[in-house]
Amino acid sequence: MSALLATIAGLMRLRAGPQDLPYSPPLLAALLVAQVGLDGLAAHHFGAGDGLLLRAVVAVLVGLGVPYLVLSVARRTARFVQTATAIVATGLAFALLVLPVVALVGRLPDDSAELTAGQVLFGWLSLALLAWKLVVQGSIFRHALEVPLRQGVLLAVALLLVELAAGLLIVASRAAAA
């Protein structure tokens, strides 16, 4: 377990790649369950549980489907399990980093003029964590696809945009149904 945590820390510091993780579909499955559980806990805490299962399933499908598609096009599908494990593990690490901050800040007001200094600071911290996450995912893609880091980061940004679009489609479809 400590070797796994050390490898995840190495991924976060751009000193390791997905090839440094074990090829373990059960580990990937366990990390996915942990990710959905953490998402559920956060959604419950902030009162956003409506449609959680659908959003979690779509996030998993997009988060794993796009990398699988890219690895397939590059003819590197053998690297999928380790790449997906790296993406999910680092995603969990970032979620664990941001969750205490979000819990301390609380719900954001509807009017931006009512933001407190702490909430504004949280916003900047969130942007920094997002940038770090994109670079970490870019590094994972760099190793998996054997491309320069900037191409890996562009792929990570594209994945983020696809995830956001899928989330917006879910929200829009639920609003239209209501």
Image: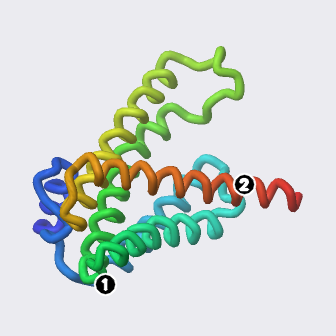
Pointers 2 and 1 in contact (CB under 8 A)? no
Picture residue at 57% right of the left edge, 51% below the top: 164
* Residue with the mark numbered 1: 25
* Quarter holding residue 79: bottom left
Left/right placement of residue 141 relative to residue 20 reads right
The one of 106 and 25 positioned closer to us in this rendering: 25
Label 1: element kind: helix
Label 2: element kind: helix
Q: Amino acid at mark 1?
A: Pro
Which mark is first along the chain, 1 or 2?
1
Left/right placement of residue 46 relative to residue 76 reads right
The one of 111 and 62 positioned closer to us in this rendering: 62
Picture residue at 13% right of the left edge, 59% below the top: 16
> Where the C terminus falls, by quadrant?
bottom right
Residue 171's label in the rendered image is 2
The crowding category of the residue bearing disc 2, from other C-alpha atoms within 10 Å (few below 14, some 14 to 19, many at least 20), is: some
